[in-house]
Image (tube, coloured by chain):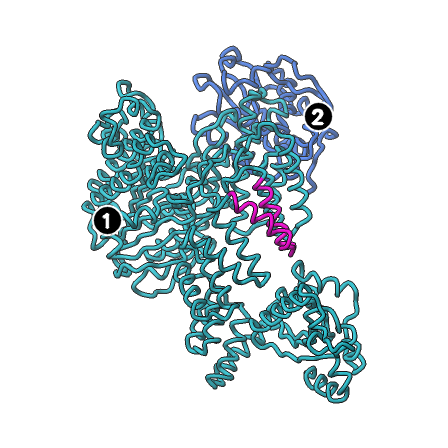
Chain colours: A cyan, B blue
């Protein structure tokens, strides 16, 4: 029988690599540096919304909020009239400590969020209410019922609590150097918050150290919220000083954030000294990061959870111990959902197939198959969860109480209080809707957003709804909501939601949304001016720069796209998307070496970014680096196994360049499985000779699609390409602007009609069309031509036949023969 | 001792109160809520029960009487007093349908949520009674109407009534079994 693997999980809410790395380089975080050097580390992708009780429950369960049941910060009390912090009884699924409980493990869990009331696990649970001082120092500091399990430890655990008033000046000075000499600073509410956070962290740390030293345990998990609190208080004062920050405030509070990290490193060092490092796996994580540079938002929205705009999308991940790679390497592609599956795999326990995260195999020294089960929820056993009668959806319970009021069985709830409860309920539903959108579950998200927006007309609900419709290509509905929101804005005197999450004032955000809708409707000429105008006021908005860059890319204005991608990278150079976009711009301009470099950086930042691997392969093929291209396409297929294009390229490489017929055959078979058939299309740079050419083709006995509805759909291919399934054995005219929306799962034969511009007969003055066309029209023609050729270049296994009408007129028989040959199956 | 009639609203609690009245039990009611189309024979309720979450002291005055307290509120009783309980149970689809009619709103989209909550309320109430050693019987609404003799005998035995089954049977009006779920 294998012995249990010992694991210590340390949660540092909001810990940010951009703060940590410089401190490590300066030698100021030796404990973390040592942990990293003997293990692996990387970025941990957060979820939306980046709200801690939801995220830490996702970390502990492997599920998103719509499954695990923790949908926000607060919930109604059992009497239905009041609100309280979210409790552990609202969690619907097992956390990792419950699974371990069933498997005979002994666990300590300290201050996890949410964990009150403490669950009856085999071990010790200290709830997240433990560290909160509810009374002044000179009054008795009661511990709420349910704070400690087992209850017998309650008195003992009281010893480890630190009251904020117990923090002395020397200790406070590490965070606030001026505190001893500045009376005003001592009485500032921000200072009180700093001292309170110090005390809370010290309390949690003391309790954890006691348990590490004095209990038998297999699994310990401790959660610190302090870095998040310190950051919300003082990241705005973190150097360098921003112009809008008063100088005195900067001097008073600029050291808080660094002191917080150093404090945590010392706590880490202490914990490491209490464990057997050789035989304990340590996992240190944060649920999200915290903007600490020019991306710190200028405004915090005046809405519940508004401060979450300060959170950045990547937290930290460090893992070291037996069975974990030991070379300090960086790994990528991890999400908060992966923590529980990874730990279960590491501890030789099955992973639930229903869990939404994956095992981070890259962490482990040895490759080992994961044992999967359908779900831990259906595995019986003593899990240490609360009694099922205590676990209920508090919002559903509140609704049931309301039902009793409506039926006349209980007194009506206080109207004001009920209003607050209903507002909070809608807000929680908003978070669940965002969680669903983040998971790609648009239909249930839209249902919720539609209802809560209709009920309340709150702007941010409407904005999110408009965005959801946009993502689902329901442009008309998106526009309708946008118009309504704009109208509301005009009428509103004091907007409840003054600022949105992008730090833009309300009207500009709506313009941004409109810009995105227009872009999605393939109207970049209307979208671009709006987005550029917004960019003037929001120069540090990464997403905006990316949107604008994508428009330029789409319009084949690669030089302008480059400028915007570089701008995005100057804002934040650690995003794979911008590197990939820049690489594409380089690729389309033929700057292959630069393109390859950018694609390599993109996959370095995000190994699972499959498009980056694909385009890397494309660039490598053009460089004639076929072996390297194969690798890139193979990785792309491992991540996105249904990418037909990669199979097409690999087939071509093996068939034409490496002359490996068996591998070519393999990819041909994969293509056959994926390819749904062949389609014959016709296009032209400008609609000039289209009708004459098609008439010629038809006269040879080939079938041309004349259906007006189909032709209209072809012109709007961006909206829907599914109709192509039904158009078989007919030649379809596809305007050049629609080519890039053709689906990958067909082989194409392209009849490319060359326009007369270059072949036009001379007039009496000896001029050809190309000499008499206006510059504008000529530029337009050349642009369209470039689009077609760019699309052709990106297609593998595309057959092209160039046609020109003059030639068809002159050599009818020969052209007919060539055409018949090309079109035969 | 106080007799409690409990159950999820619309599970036959008012009918049970009528049976107790027919058995000459003393009913604690103030007749504030009078009969209507949902309960043509009356509700038999005490207004003070509506505030039981905040104040249960009124129970001290009810020794020897029978009172209706719907299921989620049973756990708010004063445990210093003695009780026996008749727990009405009914198919939850029928309960929810009946409630929907009573509130006059379409609640189809909340049906499953209410059923889940009511299942929990029933179990919580049951566990509350068991853990506090309060004697109780469970009466199925459908059985009361369709196999009334057996069920009524069970009730008579539990309450130690001298009333005859026939006297009680006359109270049960089949025509009022609406919102019936087809077998």
Residue A520 within the magenta-colored segment of the rendering: yes
Residue range in magenta is A508-537
Can residue A596 be seen by looking at this rendering?
yes
- Residue B89 appears at what percent x and percent y? 59, 32
Relative to the observer, which residue lies in front, B134 or A31? A31
Crowding near pointer 1: few (<14 within 10 Å), some, many (20+)?
few
Toward the top, the furthest residue is B61
Q: Residue at x 19, y 45 (%)?
A: A274
Chain of the residue under label 2:
B
Res A769 → quadrant: bottom right
Chain of the residue under label 1:
A
Q: Which of pointers 1 and 2 indicates the residue nearer the eye? A: 1
Give the label on residue A377, or none: none
Q: Quadrant of the C terminus of chain B?
A: top right
Relative to the observer, which residue lies in front, A648 or B102? A648
In the picture shown, does residue B137 fall above or below A626? above
Q: Circles 1 and 2: CB distance less than 8 Å?
A: no
Can residue A119 be seen by looking at this rendering?
no
Q: Which residue has dot 1 on it?
A: A26
Specify whether A423 is left or right of A350: right
- Residue B41 appears at what percent x and percent y? 71, 21
Residue A392 within the magenta-colored segment of the rendering: no
Secondary structure beneath dot 1 equals: loop
In the picture shown, does residue A698 fall above or below B23? below
| Main secondary structure along the magenta-highlighted residues | helix
Q: Which residue has dot 2 on it?
A: B38
Q: Residue at x 62, y 79 (%)?
A: A799
* Distance from the alpha carbon under mark 1 to that under mark 2: 77 Å
Q: Residue at x 25, y 29 (%)?
A: A178
Relative to the observer, which residue lies in front, B169 or A556? A556
């Amino acid at each position: 029988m294998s012995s249990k693997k010992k694991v210590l999980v340390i949660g540092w809410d909001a810990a940010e690599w951009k703060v940590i790395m410089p401190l490590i380089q300066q030698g100021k975080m030796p404990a973390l540096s040592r942990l990293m050097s003997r293990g692996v580390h990387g970025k941990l992708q957060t979820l939306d919304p980046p709200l801690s009780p939801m995220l830490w429950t996702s970390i502990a369960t492997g599920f998103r909020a719509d499954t695990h049941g923790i949908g926000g910060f607060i919930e109604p009390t059992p009497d239905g009239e009041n609100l309280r912090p979210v409790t552990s009884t609202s969690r619907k699924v097992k956390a990792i400590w419950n699974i371990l409980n069933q498997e005979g493990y002994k666990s300590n869990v300290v201050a996890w969020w949410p964990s009150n009331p403490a669950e009856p696990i085999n071990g010790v649970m200290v709830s997240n209410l433990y560290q909160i001082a509810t009374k002044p120092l000179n009054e008795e500091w009661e511990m709420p019922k349910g704070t400690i399990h087992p209850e017998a430890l309650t008195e003992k655990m009281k010893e480890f609590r630190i009251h904020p008033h117990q923090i002395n000046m020397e200790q406070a000075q590490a965070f606030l150097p001026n505190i001893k000499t500045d009376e005003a600073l001592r009485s500032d509410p921000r200072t009180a918050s700093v001292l309170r956070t110090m005390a809370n962290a010290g309390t949690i740390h003391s309790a954890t150290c006691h348990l590490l030293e004095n209990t038998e345990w297999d699994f310990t998990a401790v959660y610190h919220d302090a870095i998040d609190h310190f950051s919300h208080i003082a990241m705005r004062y973190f150097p360098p000083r921003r112009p809008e920050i008063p100088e005195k405030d900067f001097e008073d509070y600029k050291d808080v954030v660094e002191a917080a990290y150093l404090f945590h490193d010392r706590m880490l060092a202490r914990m490491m000294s209490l464990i057997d490092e050789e035989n304990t796996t340590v996992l240190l994580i944060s649920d999200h990061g915290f903007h600490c540079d020019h991306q710190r938002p200028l405004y915090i929205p005046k809405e519940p959870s508004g401060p979450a705009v300060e959170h950045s999308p990547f937290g930290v991940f460090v893992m070291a111990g037996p069975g974990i790679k030991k070379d300090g390497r960086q790994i990528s592609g991890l999400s908060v959902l992966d923590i529980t599956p990874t730990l279960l795999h590491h501890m030789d326990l099955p992973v639930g197939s229903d869990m939404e995260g994956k095992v981070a195999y890259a962490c482990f020294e040895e490759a080992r198959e994961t044992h999967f089960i359908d779900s831990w929820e259906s595995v019986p056993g003593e899990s240490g969860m609360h009694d099922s009668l205590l676990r209920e959806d508090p919002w559903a319970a509140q609704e049931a109480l309301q039902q009793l009021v409506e039926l006349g069985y209980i007194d009506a709830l206080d109207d004001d209080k009920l209003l607050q409860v209903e507002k909070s309920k809608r807000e929680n539903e908003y978070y669940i809707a965002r969680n669903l959108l983040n998971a790609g579950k648009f239909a249930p998200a839209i249902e919720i957003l539609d209802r809560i927006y209709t009920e309340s007309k709150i702007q941010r609900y409407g904005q999110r709804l408009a965005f959801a419709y946009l993502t689902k290509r329901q442009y008309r509905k998106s526009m309708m909501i946008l118009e309504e929101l704009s109208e509301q804005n005009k009428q509103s005197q004091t907007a409840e939601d003054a600022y949105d999450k992008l730090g833009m004032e309300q009207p500009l955000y709506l313009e941004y949304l409109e810009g995105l809708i227009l872009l999605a409707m393939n109207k970049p000429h209307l979208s671009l001016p709006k987005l550029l105008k917004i960019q003037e006021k929001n120069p540090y908005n990464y997403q905006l720069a990316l949107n604008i860059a994508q428009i330029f890319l789409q319009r084949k204005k690669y030089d302008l796209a480059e400028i915007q991608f570089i701008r995005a990278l100057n804002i934040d150079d650690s995003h794979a998307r911008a590197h990939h976009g820049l690489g594409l711009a380089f690729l389309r301009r033929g700057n292959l070496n630069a393109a390859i470099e950018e694609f390599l950086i993109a996959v370095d930042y995000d190994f699972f970014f499959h498009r980056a691997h694909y385009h890397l392969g494309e660039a490598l093929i053009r460089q004639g680096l076929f072996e390297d291209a194969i690798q890139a396409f193979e990785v792309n297929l491992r991540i996105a196994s249904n990418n037909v294009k990669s199979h097409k390229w690999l087939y071509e490489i093996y068939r034409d360049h490496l002359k490996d017929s068996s591998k070519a055959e393999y990819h041909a078979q994969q293509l056959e499985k994926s390819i749904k058939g062949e389609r014959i299309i016709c296009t032209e740079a400008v609609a000039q000779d289209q009708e004459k050419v098609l008439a010629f083709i038809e006269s040879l006995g080939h079938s041309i699609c004349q259906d007006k509805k189909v032709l209209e759909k072809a012109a709007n291919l961006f909206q829907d390409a599914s109709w192509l399934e039904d158009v078989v054995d007919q030649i379809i005219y596809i305007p050049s602007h629609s080519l890039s929306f053709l689906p990958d799962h067909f082989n194409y034969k392209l009849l490319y009609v060359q326009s007369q511009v270059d072949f036009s007969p001379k007039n009496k003055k000896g001029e050809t069309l190309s000499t008499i066309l206006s510059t504008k029209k000529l530029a337009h023609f050349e642009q369209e031509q470039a689009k077609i050729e760019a699309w052709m270049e990106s297609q593998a296994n595309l057959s092209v036949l160039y046609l020109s009408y003059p030639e068809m007129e002159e050599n009818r028989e020969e052209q007919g023969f060539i055409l018949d040959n090309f079109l035969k199956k | 001792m106080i007799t409690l009639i409990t159950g999820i609203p619309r599970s036959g609690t008012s009918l049970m109160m009528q049976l107790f009245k027919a058995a000459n039990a003393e009913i604690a009611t103030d007749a504030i809520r009078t009969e209507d189309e949902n309960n043509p024979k009356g509700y038999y309720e005490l207004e003070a029960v509506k505030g039981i979450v905040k104040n249960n002291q009124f129970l001290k005055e009810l020794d020897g009487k029978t009172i209706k307290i719907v299921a989620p509120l049973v756990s708010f009783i004063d445990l210093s007093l003695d009780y026996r309980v008749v727990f009405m149970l009914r198919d939850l689809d029928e309960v929810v349908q009946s409630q929907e009619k009573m509130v006059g709103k379409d609640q189809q989209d909340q049906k499953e949520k209410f059923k889940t909550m009511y299942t929990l309320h029933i179990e919580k109430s049951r566990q509350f009674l068991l853990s506090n050693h309060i004697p109780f019987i469970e009466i199925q609404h459908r059985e009361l109407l369709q196999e009334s003799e057996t069920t009524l005998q069970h009730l008579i035995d539990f309450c130690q009534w001298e009333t005859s089954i026939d006297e009680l049977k006359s109270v049960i009006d089949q025509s009022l079994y609406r919102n019936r779920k087809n077998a």
